């Protein structure tokens, strides 16, 4: 999809490991990444966005194996995962007790997690070998950004700034990821997004 030097990915990963913040492309819009196990890095993301720390940001993982390391994924999601991962489908799931994730990415003992279909988003999480914060790269309450000029314009008055930008040009405008959760043994769509889910009840009932 995009041509990007491996050296640029490596530089971004070094910055993430050091607690820095990176603006990067996803399959929906530009996102802002940090090591999800590093609370100071997560705090910096929230400060740049002007977002309350009580609202946990979503995460991107490299693959299903990494997702299962941090989240207790219910079998009820198996069909959706098989159909839409990698892709813009975020699953709200209980966090594993042994998780090393920052408490700032946890809300009500759950995390919001997805496997991205964008090669750069995937590469960052895979190389870092832990989940990355993947909230949209815009001020809280402002429109999502599909190019870096828009991102920098929104963040220009913020005291804290991202440490690195990965420029993939203008992204195609798409809806945000669809967010789903489990409630009373059924799948509930919490946010309608790029993936349309109209499940039949019996398809997603827990065994």
Image (cartoon, rainbow, N blue to C red):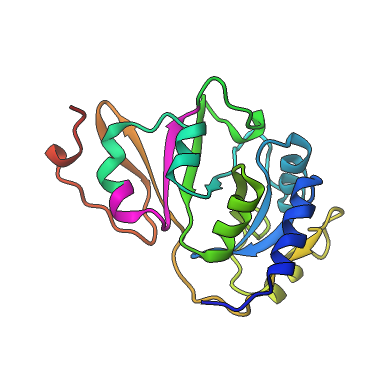
Range of the magenta residues?
Answer: 81-95
Residue most extreme to the top: 97
**Residue 50 in the image, given as x and y percentages of width and height:** 73, 49
Out of 137 and 156, give the one closest to the viewer: 137
Of the 4 image quadrants, the one containing the C terminus is top left
Q: Residue at x 29, y 47 (%)?
A: 80
Q: Is-magenta flag for residue 87?
A: yes
Viewer-closest of 87 and 69: 69
- Residue positioned 61% across, 42% down in the render: 130
In the visual, does 41 lie left or right of 96? right
Residue at (71% x, 45% y) in the render: 46
Count of numbered labels shown in the rendering: 0
Classify residue 162 as left or right of residue 170: right
Q: Residue at 74% x, 68% y: name it.
A: 7
Q: Is residue 134 above or below residue 206?
A: below
Residue 29 in sight here: no
- The residue lying furthest to the right in this view is 159
Q: Nearer the viewer, residue 42 or 139?
A: 42
**Is residue 192 inside the magenta stretch?**
no
> Is residue 159 visible to the viewer in this orientation of the structure?
yes
Q: Position of residue 91 (x, y in %)?
A: 41, 42
The image shows residue 75, relative to residue 130, as above or below, that is above
Q: Position of residue 9 (x, y in %)?
A: 69, 64
Residue 85 position in % (x across, y down): 38, 53
């Amino acid at each position: 999809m995009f041509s990007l030097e491996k050296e640029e990915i490596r530089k971004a990963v070094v910055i993430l490991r050091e607690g820095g913040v990176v603006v990067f492309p996803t399959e929906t819009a530009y996102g802002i990444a940090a090591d999800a196990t590093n609370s100071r890095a997560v705090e910096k993301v929230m400060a740049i966005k002007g977002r309350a720390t009580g609202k946990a940001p979503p995460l991107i993982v490299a693959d299903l194996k990494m997702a299962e390391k941090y989240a207790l994924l219910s079998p009820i999601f198996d069909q959706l995962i098989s159909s839409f991962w990698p892709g813009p489908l975020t699953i709200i799931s209980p966090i594993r007790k042994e998780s090393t994730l920052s408490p700032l990415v946890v809300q009500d003992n759950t995390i919001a997690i997805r496997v991205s279909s964008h090669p750069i988003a995937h590469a960052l999480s895979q190389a870092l070998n832990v989940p990355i914060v993947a909230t949209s790269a815009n001020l809280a309450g402002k429109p999502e950004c599909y190019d870096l000029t828009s991102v920098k314009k929104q963040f220009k008055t913020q005291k804290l700034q991202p440490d690195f930008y990965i420029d993939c040009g203008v992204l195609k405008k798409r809806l945000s990821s669809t967010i789903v959760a489990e409630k009373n043994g059924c799948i509930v769509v919490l946010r309608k997004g790029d993936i349309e889910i109209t499940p039949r009840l019996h398809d997603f009932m827990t065994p």
